[in-house]
Image: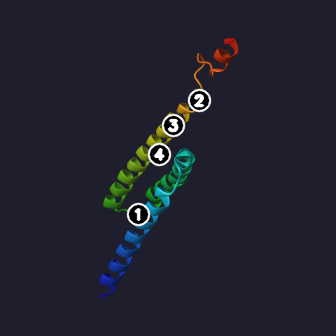
Amino acid sequence: MLLASTLTTNLAILVLAGFIGFVVISKVPNTLHTPLMSGTNAIHGIVLLGGLLIVGFSGNGTFNKIILVIAIAFGTINVVGGFLVTDRMLEMFKSKPGRDSGKGDQEKKP
């Protein structure tokens, strides 16, 4: 009976956390997505470090080590992909070296 109660509680927390996360993220303006993504990538790097520590301190359980290695691999893919997307988004805001900002054309008009 205790297991069913714990499972129900954990599932309720998971659903509520997903709903609250969706509501919070949907309210973030587009201009803040890049800094928000960079921050979450940094946090995910800390999670990866924790996963590596758990692998190092885990006992003889081969299954646990396999699951942890898979989780670390997916987390690494997430961090690297997130930083690549963030870098690509930041490149959009940089001015091109060969282009003018349009001010020179206005000065030439009589």
Residue sitting farthest toward the bottom: 1
Q: Amino acid at mark 3?
A: Met
Q: Which residue is mark 2?
A: 94
Name the residue at 66% across, 18% down: 106
Crowding near pointer 1: few (<14 within 10 Å), some, many (20+)?
A: few
In the displayed structure image, the side of residue 36 where residue 71 appears, left or right: left
Above or below, 90 against 30 in this view is above
- Residue 21 rendering spot, x and y as whole percentages: 46, 62
Q: Label 1: which residue? A: 59
Q: Earlier in the sequence, mark 2 or mark 4?
A: 4
Q: Position of residue 57 (x, y in %)?
A: 47, 60
| Tag in front: 2 or 1 | 2
Give the spatial CA distance, label 3 vs label 2. 10 Å
Residues under numbered marks 3 and 1 in contact, where contact means CB atoms less than 8 Å apart: no
Q: Are marks 2 and 1 in contact (CB under 8 Å)?
A: no
- Looking at numbered disc 2 in the image, what kind of residue is underneath it? Lys
9 lies above or below 26: below
Q: How many marks?
A: 4
Residue underneath mark 4: 79
Three-letter amino acid code of the residue under disc 1? Gly
Give the residue displayed 33% in from the left and 55% down from the top. Answer: 66
Q: Quick check: marks 3 and 4 in contact, CB under 8 Å?
A: no
Which residue is label 3 attached to? 89
**Lower sequence index among marks 2 and 1:** 1
Q: Nearer the viewer, mark 2 or mark 4?
A: 2
